[in-house]
Image (tube, coloured by chain):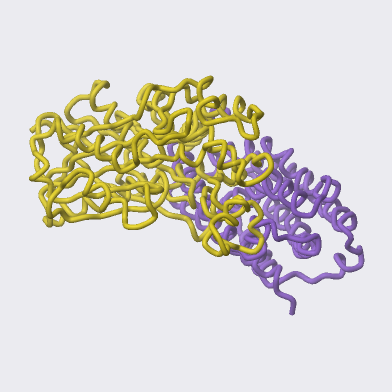
Amino acid sequence: MTEQLLSPQGQQCLQALMRVWFEFERQLGRVPLLQRLERGQFSKADYCQLLLNWRQQVIEGSRWISRCASSFDRDYSDVRSVIIGHAREEHRDYEMLEQDYLAAGGSLSDIQGAARNVGTEALHGFLMYRASQPNPVDLIGAMWIIEGLGQKMASGWAGQIDNCTSGDGSYTRFMRYHGANDDDHMQKLYQLIDRLCQSPQQLSAIVRTARVTARLYCLQLEETDNEY
Amino acid sequence: MSVYITASGHFLPGPAISNDEMEPLLGYVHGKPSRLKRRILQSNGIKFRHYAIDANHNTTISNAAMAAKAAEHCLSQSFIGKRQVKMLSAATSQGDIVLPGFGSMLQAELGLNDIELHSSHGICSSSMMALKAAFTNLKAGEQQNALVVASELTSRLFKASRYEAAGSTPDFNAEFLRWMLSDGAGALLLENQPRNKCFRIDWIRSFSHADAYPVCMSVGYPTDNSINRSWQDYPTYAAAEADGALLIRQDVRLLENIVKLGVDGYLRLIAEGRVQADKIDHVLCHYSSHYFRGKIFDMMQRAGVGVAEHKWYSNLYSRGNTGCASIFIMLDEFRRTQSYSVGDTILCMVPESGRFNNAYMQLTVVEA
């Protein structure tokens, strides 16, 4: 790992965010769909179901992050630049996800016609609400969780999904792609933590938003098994 | 009431076995040299270890007898004799026999009278659980002293014949631990009064995460465990063995979680105010492999709560990974050979991969 330059406040924030992340990983470990994946009892149909549920959040993801950028005022224009760049890079990622869905045997009309699941509704609602606040510093906590998950998908899930379903990587491109760009994103995140966490109040807001995001993300994955 | 580690001991069976001597001793599976050995040894960094079996696969000393030797070594340097021992707390991942508890067998081997007994079962962290049981017992004022012993004799699982009985070439997960684990025992004496220069136990804490992670290290499941069958569910033990259900396995894919969980516990203890990173003078961490040491070190560093490299002590490379006995064998050698001063803080960490239990202990060097 490369050395980081973090202020004492930033360092404390990083420690707290690491703990939220570890807790999030344990929450993920209790999600039935992911437990099946870990056990190797995971079919292509499970994978399609996962993508189907995921797509809505990926689409909405680019929206809250764009709104987040626009909610920062001119004192934070440097932050805005970073976030706009990030939003631009990722705002059409869902197309890759759709291609994976097709390659795994799904149909375009199914995935495009699917509604947001209950967890996605909650997650999206929360993130859009936070992103609409002036200078939403706390959303760095949400990015921490979502970027972290990108790394996890790429380093763990994609390979395991291919193992379980005898895949050759041709339908796990979205997950793998997320990991490939991750180092760069994480680097930017560390810098943002230093920039945005400058008071104890900001620290607790960042950690709280990370926690809520983590919980709602899990809810979204838990809901993958539910069909209403 | 304070509790002190006033003496320690160890026992390592037979001569030190180098990397080149391992396979001739454990045996060539189906007569062929292992293809994984070099890679695994390179990553764990272990150079020497000890085995309680010989090249003919005779067991040279039992697990209980090894534990007894370590306990006797410990007592031989203490202020108390066998008759004064009040409690025996013992740990192993596999005793010589399935039942009764390992503590009972060890008590008989040692010839201790009328003691209070505790057996702790698990993998690497079982020694810390045994230690905690003794620690709390003394702290509650129930006993004045306790002998805590951890011992492992895993080499019996690594004989070539075991793998051959399970059929074709062992898969990576089944072979992995063959090049990781070895035998040995360690013992600590706890007392409610300090003696000379000794270690006060400030606290012992553990965090278990079995509810969130699958089994990572095990004996008892067959190679293909899709129907969730245990070795005891087969009509005969021979059938279980043929199905690979008696092999010791590590799910290597899950192993990396140990790093995060180890650091997670450390960060919790910092948040609770129990640990202050800049006050730690020595770190004794039971990492199973050199590979993980770097990862744990880096992650602590990244969180801004790293401990300088020269403060880390381990004898993994020369004594081997002896499972639950490792941390006691390490503490014992640290006590004898390293320099430390009154007031020094020692942090011990045991991240266990069995199903992810992480134990921590803080010691302070005191002088009576």
Q: Residue at x 15, y 53 (%)?
A: B115
- Quarter of the image where the C terminus of chain A is located: bottom right
Residue A6 appears in the picture as rendered: no
Looking at the rendered image, the quarter that the N terminus of chain A falls into is top right
Say whether residue B185 is left or right of residue B302: left
Residue B281 image-quadrant placement? top left
Q: Nearer the viewer, residue B364 or B44?
A: B44
Look at the image and give the colour of chain A: purple
Q: Whole-percent x and y of residue B96?
A: 37, 47
Residue B97 in view? yes
Q: Percent position (x, y) of residue B117? A: 21, 55
Nearest to the observer: residue B98 or residue A183: B98
Q: Is residue B280 left or right of residue B29?
A: left
Seen at 32% across and 38% down, the residue is B276
Q: Residue B81 in the image: x percent, y percent?
A: 9, 39
Query: In the picture, residue A44 is in which quadrant?
Result: bottom right
Q: Quadrant of residue A75?
A: top right
Considering every residue shown, the one lying at the far bottom of the view is A228
Q: Which chain is yellow?
A: B
Location of residue A69 with respect to B40 vertically, above or below? below
